[in-house]
């Protein structure tokens, strides 16, 4: 049920980016929502379960933060969260 809620929350960001590909705020917020989805998943699922899905969420969040920082190099929160994504990715690769 919670996944459906998150998917519905992502739709406005997808629409915003479709209508304005330079909307760095929508990219940032979409990436943030992906991280929240990942956290919700980690809290409710065995850590070894759905690792492919978690990796995909991390990669997508990293991609969106990358795009947001290219559009607005002064978006410091995006750099910070992007680094967190890369840190989580590195940690998960070391753990496996």
Image (cartoon, rainbow, N blue to C red):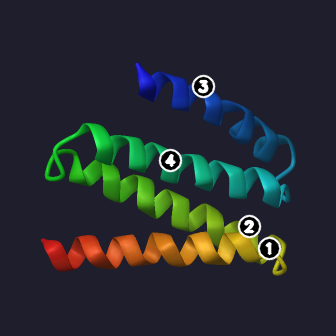
Which numbered disc, 2 or 4, marks the residue that appears first in the sequence? Answer: 4
Task: Say which element carries label 1.
Answer: loop
Residue 70, image x, y percentages? 76, 76
Cα gap from disc 3 to disc 1, whole angstroms = 25 Å
Question: Nearer the viewer's eye, disc 3 or disc 4?
Answer: 4
Number of numbered discs visible in the structure rendering: 4
Q: Is residue 50 above or below residue 10?
A: below
Q: Nearer the viewer, mark 2 or mark 4?
A: 4
Q: Is mark 4 on a helix, strand or loop?
A: helix
Circle number at residue 36: 4
Determine contact: label 2, label 1, CB under 8 Å.
yes
Q: Position of residue 91 (x, y in %)?
A: 28, 76
The residue under label 3 is 8
Kindly identify the residue that appears in the image at 53 percent across and 78 percent down.
83
Q: Do the residues labelled 3 and 2 touch (CB within 8 Å)?
A: no
Residue most extreme to the top:
1
In the rendered view of the protein, which quadrant contains the N terminus?
Answer: top left
Instruction: Tell me which label, 2 or 1, sits earlier in the chain.
Output: 2
Relative to 2, is 61 on the left or the right? right
Q: Residue at x 43, y 25 (%)?
A: 2
Q: Is mark 2 on a helix, strand or loop?
A: helix
Q: For the residue carrying disc 1, how many other residues have a C-alpha within 10 Å: few (<14), some (14-19), or many (20+)?
A: some
**Which residue corresponds to the image point at 60% horizontal and 25% vertical from the top-left?**
8
- Residue matched to label 2: 68
Q: Is residue 68 above or below residue 39?
A: below
Percent of width and height locating residue 4: 47, 23
């Amino acid at each position: 049920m919670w996944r459906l809620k998150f998917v519905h929350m992502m739709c406005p960001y997808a629409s915003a980016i479709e209508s304005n590909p330079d909307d760095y705020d929508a990219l940032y917020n979409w990436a943030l929502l992906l991280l929240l989805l990942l956290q919700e998943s980690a809290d409710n699922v065995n850590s070894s379960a759905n690792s492919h899905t978690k990796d995909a969420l991390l990669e997508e969040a990293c991609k969106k933060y990358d795009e947001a920082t290219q559009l607005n190099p002064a978006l410091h929160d995006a750099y910070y969260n992007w680094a967190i994504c890369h840190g989580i990715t590195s940690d998960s690769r070391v753990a496996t």
